[in-house]
Image: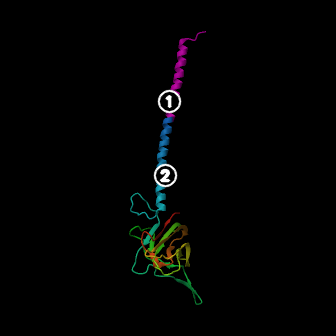
Amino acid sequence: MAIPVSVQCVGLITLVAILVQTIAVALTFVYFNKVLNTKMTDRFQREMSITVRNKLTDVLPVLSPGIRGVSLPKVAAHVTGVVSSSSSSSSSSEPSSTGGSRMIRSHLGERIRSWEGHRGLSFLQNMELRGGELVTPTAGLYYIYAQTYFRLPPTGETEQEGAQLVQYVYKKMSSYTVPILLMKSSRSVCWPRGPEPGLFSLHQAGTAFLQHADRLFITVSNATNMEMDGRASYFGAFLIG
């Protein structure tokens, strides 16, 4: 039995309509999916850019606060060595108490007091520098770092024992009279022979929880041989949590 032509036309038109609708839905899905992916990618890139920039700022505390587009941590300091007319370490040991006739030293090494906090690469961001000590304004977890640079003069042909270079990082608390050792770094070196001096450096870094008004300071052995170049001898701290 033959199907009327009109029924065939209606079936064909219906099939075409369904096909067009399917294509339209597919194109719409592709379009909106592309737009959504583009927006998410842009947002992700912006967030990643901010995150990476902040992390770089965190791990590079020597960046000057005057650099455009770079935001420093809210609490941070980077102080550098400075050559003074007096000895860089005005006190080699500080007695904290006496036990009979024996004097007890409050810390090891010779304290470094000549630090620059405002010029060159140094800066103070909501922290104070008092008598060579960094004062923390708020309690929290701090990242602390230090580097000291030594220039040992040549000994010529004379025999001389090796030098023990040691760097200490201390904190002082108002509730405790004796400074607390946070970090220590050491290196055994031989005194140089010949016309050239021996150049050595000690570097260390770590984290510590500090209270309000805690103080940080650096002591070293062989302080008379320490070179107070601002790019070679420095220390600092910044709040990370």
The residue shown at (49%, 70%) is 146
The label nearer to you, 2 versus 1, is 2
**10 is within the stretch colored magenta:** yes
Q: Which secondary structure type mostly characterizes the magenta part of the structure?
A: helix
Q: Is residue 130 visible?
A: no
The residue shown at (56%, 11%) is 4
The residue shown at (39%, 60%) is 67
Please determine whether, in this image, residue 3 is positioned above or below residue 78.
above
Residue that lies at the very extreme toward the bottom in this rendered image: 101
Label 2 CA crowd tier, 10 Å (few <14, some 14–19, many 20+): few
Residue that lies at the very extreme toward the top in this rendered image: 1
Element type where label 2 sits in the image: helix
The quadrant in which the N terminus is found is top right
Task: Say which mark, if any, is on residue 103.
Answer: none
**Residue at numbered disc 1:** 24
How was the colour assigned to the protein in this rendering? rainbow
What residue type is disc 2 on?
Met
Q: Which residues are magenta?
A: 1-29
What residue type is disc 1 on?
Ala
Residue 115 screen position, x and y as percent: 43, 74
Residue 29 screen position, x and y as percent: 51, 35
**Residue at numbered disc 2:** 48
**133 is within the stretch colored magenta:** no
The residue shown at (52%, 32%) is 26
Please determine whether, in this image, residue 67 is positioned above or below residue 87.
above
Nearest to N terminus: mark 2 or mark 1: 1
